Amino acid sequence: MYKRGEKRDTITKSEKGGEFFGLENQFIRTQILLGQEAREKLGRSKVAVFGVGGVGGYVAEALARCGVGAFELIDRDQVSVSNLNRQIIATWSTVGMDKTEAMARRIHDINPGAQVAQRKCFYLPETADQFDFTQYDYVVDAVDTVTAKIEIIMQAQRAGVPVISSMGAGNKMDPSKFEAADIYKTSVDPLARVMRRELKKRGVKDNGDGTYLYKGYTYDGTVYTVDVQVTDNGDGTITAETAKAADASGTPEGGETPASASYKFTNAYDADGTLKLDAEKVFKNGTLHGGEFTFKLMDADGEELQSKTNDAAGNVSFNLITYSMKDLKNSPFTYTVMEVPGTRTDVKYDATVYTVTVELKDNGDGTLEVTKTVDNGGELKFVNEQLNVETTVTIGGEKVLKGRKLKEGEFKFVLADENGKWVDTATNDASGNFTFKPITYKLFDLKGEKSKVYTYGISEVK
């Protein structure tokens, strides 16, 4: 079985039309572009392609045309008619064929010397132990499910193998918007957002500097090349000695002796956690508007850290506070949250000052457990009250009787609202005047409006 980094024979050279054909000629353009050493490295490389469909098929073909020497193709699907519009392996002659088989045939048509292993299965967490990632030089994640994508990335990082993962590009029309970036630097794409969240939960991150972060530990990604020279001394003995240890760039790292100190791997540990503080604003007897009231978050010394206003639903959200390992020695932290008193004379402001205590604990997996305790009931709730601001109006009329003198209380009148509901009744006095009881209006009745018109009807009761 082909192993990672193993040399293979090139394809058989042949003559065709007087022109010499072979590996050297087939990949000469790649060599001109990248150099002979890089071209030879591609020929010694083994790439695992998880998912041989719309993305994985094109990736595998491009790698084959670049001269990659060995592949492991992982997919359980068969080519279907619906694949014909976009998948490079899909033709009428391959419909119904296993995708790994169709891809393997294309690779061999391009480079008969390439070694192709087929794994006709779906990669899932429950099948992960069937794969040895250390045999790969590079991993391509072109699968659809989030659980499989996460597991592939985690296994690749554990093995110290670089991995590239495809995100969501379906139904997109502008290829100029496509970017290759660290997963933590992606934006817009919903799938990438889920991957960022899930990978962060698991403490996985590529630092982009030759190290990678896994569960809080920054692992040294250095790969040393060690040459051991064995010499026949000519006296019936042989000796073996190591040359200078060199990293992947060829830079010597130590002396010429085989001391373990020559091969130094430096790891580091860090952990982080976040605090989310939210408050609730209630406006009793009033109509709450977004941005109407202001709240402050302060540290133990009374220094203001953040200032926020409520939204129309009464939510007050402070920015996340992030902690790292260096903060652990200062735990617990104390904060205070209060409402900033306003200037409105018709509002009674909540003067409560809440104390929030935050304790940190290292979970040992790159995360900090952040526990908050809030006094005065355990929740940040501020209740303001709209005070009684009111006014009254008095409505009345006159009764005129022709032909004789009017008697007091002789006629009855009703005041009704716009829905026909009686508000009050009144009778005339001796002069013919009648007056309904005063109607009281409160600021609360406006329900946040600047003004409001109330319509009434006055009629005589027969």
Image (spheres, rainbow, N blue to C red):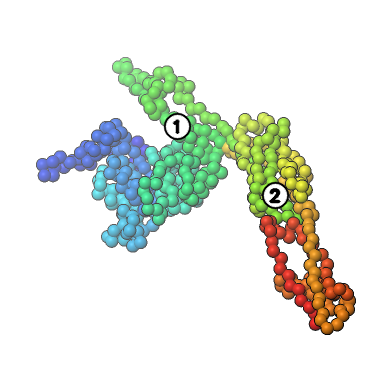
Which numbered disc covers residue 210?
A: 1
Name the residue located 67 percent from the left edge and 48 percent from the top edge.
Answer: 292
Return the residue found at the far front: 403
383, 147: nearer the viewer: 383
Instruction: Estimate the x, y position of residue 76 in percent, counting from the top left.
Output: 40, 55
Return the residue found at the far left: 18
Position of 199 with respect to 433 (left or right) is left
Name the residue located 76 percent from the left edge and 50 percent from the top edge.
Answer: 346
What residue does disc 2 label?
Answer: 280
Q: Quadrant of the C terminus?
A: bottom right
For marks 2 and 1, the one nearer the N-term is 1
Query: From what the image shows, is residue 110 above or below residue 300?
Result: below
Instruction: Estimate the x, y position of residue 405 in percent, counting from the top left.
Output: 87, 80
Name the residue located 39 percent from the left edge and 29 percent from the top edge.
Answer: 248
404, 235: nearer the viewer: 404
Q: Quadrant of the N terminus?
A: top left
Query: What amino acid does circle 1 point to?
Result: Gly
